[in-house]
Image: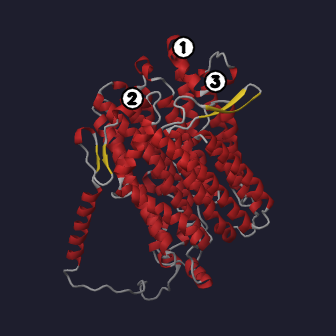
Amino acid sequence: MTPEQAVLNSIGICVAGAVLTLLVSKSKSLSGWLAFLTTAASGALIVPAALRVLTSGPAAPHHPETLWMAGGYAMRFYIDGLSAIFLLLAVVIGVLASLYSITHLEKSYQSKSAATYYPFLLLFIGGMYGILSTTDTMWFFCAFWQLMTIPSFLLLRYEIEKPGISGASIKYLLFMEAAMLAAMLGAGMLSGGHADASLKYDFDILSEGIPALLSSNPGALTGALALFLLGFGIKVGMWPFGQLWVPDAYAAAPSPVTALISGVMSKTGIYGLMRTFLWLVPAESLGNYNFGNWGMLLAVLGTITLFSGTMQGLKQDDTKRLLAFSSIGQIGYILLALGTCVALLPTGDQKLVSLAAIAFCGGLLHAINHGIFKGLLFFSAGSLTQATGTQDLNKMGGMWKYMPFTGLAVLIASFGIAGVPLLNGFVSKWSIYVAAIQGSASAKYLAICAIIAILTSALTLAMYIKFFGAAFLSRRSTLVKDNAAKQGTLEVGFTQQIPQLSLAALCIAIGLAPGAVYQILSQVLNTSRQGFAEKLADANTVGAGALSGLNAVQGSALYVPVVIGIVMAIAFLVVYTFSKQGGSTRRTADTWLCGYAKEADCYRYSASNFYGEIKRHFGWLGGNPRKQAVVKED
């Protein structure tokens, strides 16, 4: 079985599973376990196929496999290294989301039917498999886009009776359809007369026609790239489009669905941008078109996206809206990496092209990392909502005592997304910073973009201090006390802990073994030699060892986790030793409220009290939090 056939069979398994889960939907538990087994079965086909591609290359390099043909339309799949790595991400998050859903649906959505959840979840996953594999940029692209979009739209409407859900889902649908239309129009601008009409919109055919198009009508390529940027930019949540649909949609969907939308579906847009800007145009056409300007546009848009999304996230008090704005911010880092890569490639200087390869690897790794820690964070947000019945951080507090495993997972993910050393986010952000700062010798604006990105990482850490602190470390709220008294324990069960802790373990593993991860990223390029990616594969000079860490161009910019770990451990021991020199003892006491006021929620330091000056001075950025109902204390 070829990798392409494995993916097609996996899509068929998802469709068949959707029918079966519908038939047994009266039993929510049976339907849930069947959905989990379906995603696991589809993953069992895709994982070995993807690993085979990453180790040995595509089954037939540069020759997509025709899997079905009828009525003059050819469905062709092609799995190279880039497709393989994104398919692996889709499998991991998809399997864990289906496992998480089993208990979450039973406890958080007791009155809702499984018939309107699991069938759509499986179709949604199948659609993402297809969009990552098809080479057709028109009709089958549209078909798999709809298979991905329509079920996710219906999943957003799972709690349609709640205020705001209907509007959020319709807005989501309109933006997704607009994104698809823009991408298809871009492909249409590049298509020309081809002997075989069924291959008119095939990716390779479009690529082959670009040299002639640059000679006769270079404006067509400019228009097509602009439409691709518009379409896939809407998909990923790029500024200014992300602020218009992402927060409402992410807050509306059930948490496992949001984990899939943020962790995987948004990456199909990243996949589309990488394909069109780095794989579409043949390498020999690099000098015939000014791609440097596109690099600048991508880098600047990425910088605006990462800063605006993070600043707006700092203002939020709703768990899922905070994570939604954070997703916009992290997408900005990936766009900055892609822009840096595209900007440095045309220079022809070997060192700068090597930096372009580092930027690409950093962006690709951050896309994978984002899928991991954002999937984990949305699972954890679902666990918090399940335990408290609210998404409002102001009504939470002291959850560490009742949910230690969920709290540990959130802490790891928070440090990872902020780029704290020894975790996965640091590796990808380090790569982006190195490429942008050293590449500024050729493109001065990259230095400014890098500085803003570095400062925004500190803001990201501040955002997750708020998220983690307000939920887990502050004094217990009345709601938490009451729920704990009624339920005894608030911690989620093993079918929800396994997805959370598995992704937390991945955050640690990638951070501690960046060399091994970079070897995989190198294989992505080596097994995807087409367009500009061939130049990136040849120029990828990052030294990587499983334990020795990384070194960039000419031995500079070293990152050795073992050394950093030793330095951090020594610093911790020094600080701890000094803290004990005074001989003071720690004690626990009730909060002093002047001796006459009783303990009440209004005296707690809640989420809305964080970062008041940022809210005051950056109100012009938008994204102001929605007003929460005020609970008066007697």
Tag 1 residue: 217
Badge 3 density bin: few <14, some 14–19, many ≥20, Cα 10 Å: some
| Mark earlier in primary sequence (1, 2) | 1
Q: Nearer the viewer, residue 120 or 321?
A: 120
Q: What crowding class fits label 2: few (fewer than 14 Cα within 10 Å), some (14-19), or many (20 or more)?
A: many
Q: Position of residue 86 (x, y in %)?
A: 53, 45
Q: Quadrant of the N terminus?
A: top right
Residue at the spot of label 2: 535
Which SS class for mark 2? helix
Name of the residue lying farthest toward the top: 216
Disc nearer the start of the sequence (2/3): 3
Residue 358 can be seen, yes or no = yes
Q: Are marks 3 and 1 in contact (CB under 8 Å)?
A: no
User: Vertical placement of 228 versus 418: above or below?
Assistant: above
Q: Earlier in the sequence, mark 3 or mark 1?
A: 3
Residue located at (60% from left, 49% from top): 45
* Type of the residue with mark 1: Asn
Along the line of sight, which residue is nearer the eye, 557 or 394?
Answer: 557
**Left or right side of 474 for 103:** right
| Gap in angstroms between the C-alphas marked 1 and 2 | 25 Å
Question: x%, y% of residue 118?
Answer: 71, 58
**Residue beneath label 3, please?**
188
Camera-nearest label, 2 or 3 = 2
Colour style of the rendered protein structure: secondary structure
Label 3 secondary element: helix
Horizontal side of 429 relative to 372 (left or right) equals left
* Residue 303 makes an appearance in the image: no
Residue nearest the viewer, comparing 162 with 344: 344
Q: CA distance from mark 2 to mark 3?
A: 27 Å
Q: Residue 382's image quarter?
A: bottom right
